[in-house]
Amino acid sequence: MIVMKFGGSSVESAEALQRVAAIIASHNRRQPVVFVSAMGKTTNRLLEIASLAASGERSAALDKIAELRAFHFEHARLVCPDRELDALRTFLDDHFQELETLVKGLAAVGELTPRSTDAVSSFGERMSSYILALALRSAGLDAVHVDAREVMITDERHGEAAPLMGPTEERMREVVAPLVSEGAIPVMGGFIASTRKGVTSTLGRGGSDYSASLGAALLGAEEVQIWTDVDGVMTADPSIAPDAHRIRVMSFAEAAELAYFGARVLHPSTMAPAVDKDIPIRVLNSRRPEVEGTLIVAESLASGTVVKSIAYKEHITVVDIRSTRMLMAHGFLARIFEVFEKHATSVDMVTTSEVSVSLTVDRTDRLDAIVEELNAVAEVDRRNGRAIVCVVGEGIRKTPGVSAKIFSALGEIPVSMISLGASRLNVSFVVEENDLDETVRRLHATFFSEVDPQIFA
Ligand code: ASP
Ligand code: MG
């Protein structure tokens, strides 16, 4: 059995859905279980609709619902078997009716909770999974739509709920595994789930990858395929470094590190279930299925290549906290982090000196309140418009001189918050956003002007 996950751009149109059907058909003998994201940018649209409604723009929200309906119907009808057209209409009617009712409710109360946001954003995957199953049946495959909310069970942290392994495994075994044994292809939405009480929840933005790898681990699949619209994981963002290479093989640890640091290909949680059960992950391009993609496995191949990839995360704010009296008094760092914790703002990087702490955050919606509280005990400055750059590779820890190479490549570009050693496989630091492209290009030229063809394409 294999798990195949298709991202939003892989199912953004009738044509894309047909391409996906052909890809699944070509893997049919490996007993695929399919997870799919919402079509195209549907999740963004749904979130827009929810916030319009909650801010009182009821008729704008309803107009956008009508557009979303037209979009889904337009593409779905082209991939739908003739005999199922009526069922498709009923399905979409029911779903858009339900969505409208929800959205009118939001407009009436004028408030958006994480729970109601989940209810609205779940519609994308609820519809895409149904529609992809239609496309597969049109292609002659025995596909069965499964509402993922009946299978994926989570805690109650709406917006970014954590799967409950016991109940989810049980449902996978009861609902999904028998379909596979009968030779059918289960098709489920990624991202969506429900709590034990049956309330709709989601795994957080980009969470379909996580649904797929978790499903694979719980079903005992032999491989997870993540189908996207790029050829695989790259040595750098090709829009910045046009000569970037595809990485042919990399380790789970490297892929996880890259995902955390903003390589947009995989959701950061994707690797954990695969590591547990040692299931290889393949990243593939649904527009160019003949490209072998990137294979992610437990061990990275030994080679002379030290660095695997250069990732970055933009729109970072650095917060500098200084206190000559207090800093190294015991409990001071704990108090600082308590403030961030209280405002549910997570901190990415931290560096400290005798009298100051610098840290980075990517969410700033609570930063005013955080700074106000910190001001009671320290001097606080913030610097917006920063980016974290992260050089990743298992070879880094074994190879002396990598950081020297990094910093000589950077030359006069101002760098702060250098962090090496916290993770054995990355060196990361902060630059100004204006210097980001130049930083990435210089590093890429330094580490990838010659590459090992076994590892890079
Ligand atoms: N559709 C969801 C999102 O856009 C989940 C996913 O695509 O992985 O975040
Ligand atoms: Mg994604």
Image: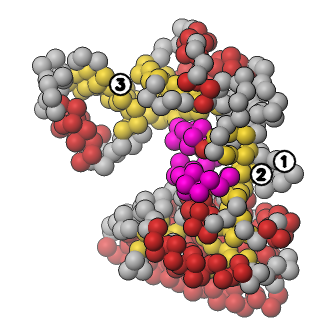
Instruction: Name the amino acid, label 3.
Output: Thr
By secondary structure, the bulk of the magenta-drawn segment is best described as helix
Image coords of residue 316 (percent x, y): 44, 34
Instruction: Give the CA separation, mark 3 to mark 1.
Output: 41 Å
| Label 3 beta carbon less than 8 Å to ligand 2 | no
- Picture quadrant where residue 73 is located: bottom right
Instruction: Give the CA separation, mark 1 to mark 2.
Output: 7 Å
**Quadrant of the image containing the N terminus:** bottom right
Question: In the shown orientation, is residue 164 left or right of residue 397?
Answer: left
Residue 358 on the magenta segment: no
The label shown at residue 113 is: none
| Label 1 beta carbon less than 8 Å to ligand 2 | no
Check disc 1 and report the residue beneath it.
291
- Picture quadrant where residue 102 is located: bottom left
Height in image: 275 above or below 216? Answer: above
- Picture residue at 31% right of the left edge, 49% below the top: 344
Q: Indicate which label's residue lies in the foreground, 3 or 2.
A: 3
Image coords of residue 120 (percent x, y): 48, 71
Check disc 3 and report the residue beneath it.
351
- Picture quadrant where residue 244 is located: top right
Q: Would you say the residues marked 1 and 2 are in contact, meaning their CB atoms lie under 8 Å apart? A: yes
Residue 271 on the magenta segment: yes
Region rendered in magenta: 253-281
Instruction: Give the CA separation, mark 3 to mark 2.
Output: 38 Å
By what rule are the colours in the image chosen?
secondary structure
Check disc 2 and report the residue beneath it.
285
Residue 45 vs residue 313, the one in the foreground: 313
Q: Residues within 10 Å of mark 3 (few under 14, many from 20)?
A: some
